[in-house]
Image: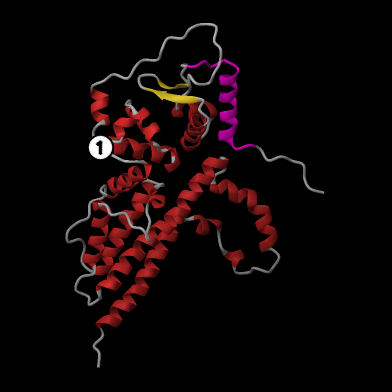
Amino acid sequence: MPSSTKRPEPPYRQIVAGIRARILTGDLRPGDRIPSIRQIAQRWGVAVATATRVMATLRDEGLVETKVGAGTVVSVRTGHKQPTVLASPPRPRRGHASKQALNRKQALRAAISIADAEGLDAVSMRRLAAELGVGPMSLYRHVANKDELVTQMADEVFGEPELPVPGPEGWRAKLELISRRQWELCRRHLWLPRAVSFTRPLLVPNMMAHTEWTLRALDGIGLPMATRIREALTLHALVHTVALSMAAEVEAEQETGVTLDRWWLIQRKRADELLSSGRFPLLATVTGETVSDVDGLFEYSLARHLDGFAVLVEDQARPRP
């Protein structure tokens, strides 16, 4: 018979349910501050990533909103009838904050901070305007829509690492350098792989500078330009493919509250049953740490790819009869 045991809700959903109940019962009224992300993490003993998921869910449900000068508060649109008239939350002060909002770089860095903390789905023109303390229409002077905003965010991020000129000696050292710089970017900004397309590349200067640097790294070894651009795109794809797996794992941890180590512990009984059956003697020798080491997977993938590319380079350099 099927088991009737219900799986417990992820920690972030339990926290959301508790805060939601306080809002709906009027314990927390419109305009009241709710705990910050750091306070949620400390009070409920969860990771900051889980706490940011809580905040994003409450915001998506329309229960909370960001008010300049007041932080995150219960939304005035929750529709509760209150026995007293609440004072209006403080108005955004024109001047310093607004000037920052009108600066394209400040707007992009604010959008990147939102994406870093809560994921790309949390980024919207309305949310960014609230973070900057301006009306959404102010942002349209710099970006036409969210798609363009994400494109400019990616361009801003690709401008973070310094690409040395001419770089280390030898084509392989150069390709290792550019790949590791991009891997570091993806680790720092987990949303970045989702913002990049290889079939419809982003025509933005900082990302194009990475591709140009890679093409220059392959100067003087006799490869046609078609091969060089394919190699540049293959390296980008290698980095971002592994990075997507890393980002998916972080998202799964936020969604379920279960770390990868804990997930393996939960699966151990099932894994032991399968591996002790004798059907998979080679898999039985593999440790869980090897499978879950995304940095190791990236380094292995990069090394083996460059080993293969070296064969192509040697073949190209060999004298033809």
Is 272 placed above or below 41 here?
below
**Disc 1: CA contacts within 10 A as few (<14), some (14-19) or many (>=20):** some
Is 16 placed above or below 179 here?
above
Of the 4 image quadrants, the one containing the C terminus is bottom left
Magenta region, main secondary structure: helix
Question: Between 314 and 63, which is closer to the camera in this rendering?
Answer: 63
Q: Is residue 106 left or right of residue 284?
A: left
**x and y percent of residue 15 in the render?**
57, 29
- Residue at point 36% right, 72% down? 307
* Quadrant in the rendering for residue 277: bottom right
Is 113 placed above or below 183 here?
above
Question: Between 139 and 210, which is closer to the camera in this rendering?
Answer: 139
**x and y percent of residue 72 in the render?**
43, 24
- Residue at point 44% right, 57% down? 242
Determine if the magenta segment contains residue 141.
no
**x and y percent of residue 219 in the render?**
20, 70
Instruction: Say which amino acid is labelled 1.
Output: Arg
Q: Is residue 96 visible?
A: yes
Highlighted magenta segment, given as a residue range? 9-30
Determine if the magenta segment contains residue 16.
yes
- Residue at point 33% right, 47% down? 151
Is 134 placed above or below 298 here?
above
* Quadrant in the rendering for residue 104: top left
Q: Which residue is mark 1?
A: 104
Query: Seen from this angle, which residue lies furthest top?
Result: 84
Query: Seen from this angle, which residue lies furthest left?
Result: 165
- Colour mapping: secondary structure
- Residue at point 28% right, 54% down? 203
* Quadrant in the rendering for residue 109: top left
Q: Secondary structure at mark 1?
A: helix
**x and y percent of residue 272 in the render?**
67, 58
